[in-house]
Amino acid sequence: MEAAKYLIFFALELLLFTQRCMCVRDVRLMLPTAVMSGHGAKFICLYDLQEAPLYSVKWYRGQREFYRYLPQENPPMKFIPIPGIDIDLYKSDANEVRLREIHSDLTGVFSCEVTADAPSFRTASASKNITIVEMPNLAPNVTVEKSLSDEGLSIISVNCTNFYSKPPGKLSIFLNEEPVSAQFVFPIF
Ligand SMILES: *[C@@H]1O[C@H](CO)[C@@H](O)[C@H](O)[C@H]1NC(C)=O
Ligand SMILES: *[C@@H]1O[C@H](CO)[C@@H](O)[C@H](O)[C@H]1NC(C)=O
Ligand SMILES: *[C@@H]1O[C@H](CO)[C@@H](O)[C@H](O)[C@H]1NC(C)=O
């Protein structure tokens, strides 16, 4: 009988404790899948603190932290400089990091990590891959050569060269607006 009483008491206590646990949950990222190198972007991190006070929000590129928001500090937002990112701190807050500029070396995984304040200090995070795209700064270079085959047929060779880009560009060749069959296209790297 005594044991059953304790068991019920313990179960109640456990239930109250789980209800009291104000943990961070549902960390969600709203990030572009790709950003043009040298351009800005808005990185958004949404989360549910379940009424717990916020201790910190930290943003990472790979393992490296580049932004943190601690409401108890003044100012709460802080940029931890890493090459290739520039942040507008005054447009950044607990949910958003406003990038003025980002460069292509930073293609990779970006994460947002949210920590609730005392007593739980629970942490939750979310990550996403972002590609920073570097466009070729010139249109492809096209050169055309005409020659005659031994049978007297005219042969046209077209050389189409793409300029540097990241990730590498894909070239498609058209003749009078019709795509040229792959059997006539020879990729040269
Ligand atoms: C990012 O991409 C890499 C390579 O494709 C993959 O292994 C990794 O799981 C991805 N990470 C996330 C958070 O999507
Ligand atoms: C385009 O290709 C031709 C032939 O290879 C070359 O002479 C020319 O310099 C190239 N143009 C540019 C902008 O690289
Ligand atoms: C095609 O053009 C590029 C430069 O425009 C040149 O480097 C390359 O050698 C050319 N290739 C052929 C097969 O003519």
Image (cartoon, rainbow, N blue to C red):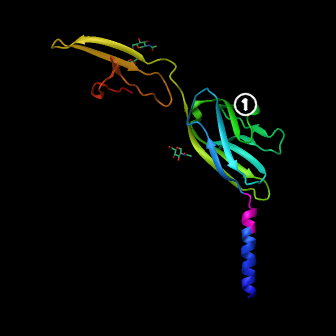
Up the image or down, 74 lies above or below 118; here it is above
Image coordinates of residue 36 in percent, x first then y, are 57, 28
Residue 107 appears left or right of 170: right
Q: Is residue 41 left or right of residue 177?
A: right
Which percent across, then down, holds residue 139? Answer: 46, 17
Q: Which residue lies most toward the left here?
A: 151
Image quadrant of ligand 3 equals: top left
Above or below residue 51? Residue 60 is above
Tell me, yes or no, whether the highlighted magenta stretch contains residue 24: no
- Residue drawn where x is 58% and y is 28% of the image: 37
Secondary structure found at label 1? loop
* Quadrant hosting residue 13: bottom right
Question: Residue 164: where, in percent of width, then height?
Answer: 48, 24
- Residue placed at 29% from the left, 26% from the top? 181
Left or right relative to 166: residue 98: right
Q: For the residue marked with disc 1, what is the amino acid?
A: Asp
Q: Which residue is mark 1?
A: 88
The number of numbered discs placed on residues in the rendered structure image is 1
- Spot the residue most to the bottom: 1
Q: Name which residue lies at 50% across and 26% down.
A: 165
> Quick one: 143 or 70, which is closer to the camera?
70
Q: Residue at x 39, y 15 (%)?
A: 142
Would you say the magenta stretch is mainly helix, strand or loop?
A: helix
Q: Quadrant of the C terminus?
A: top left
Q: Which residues are magenta?
A: 16-22
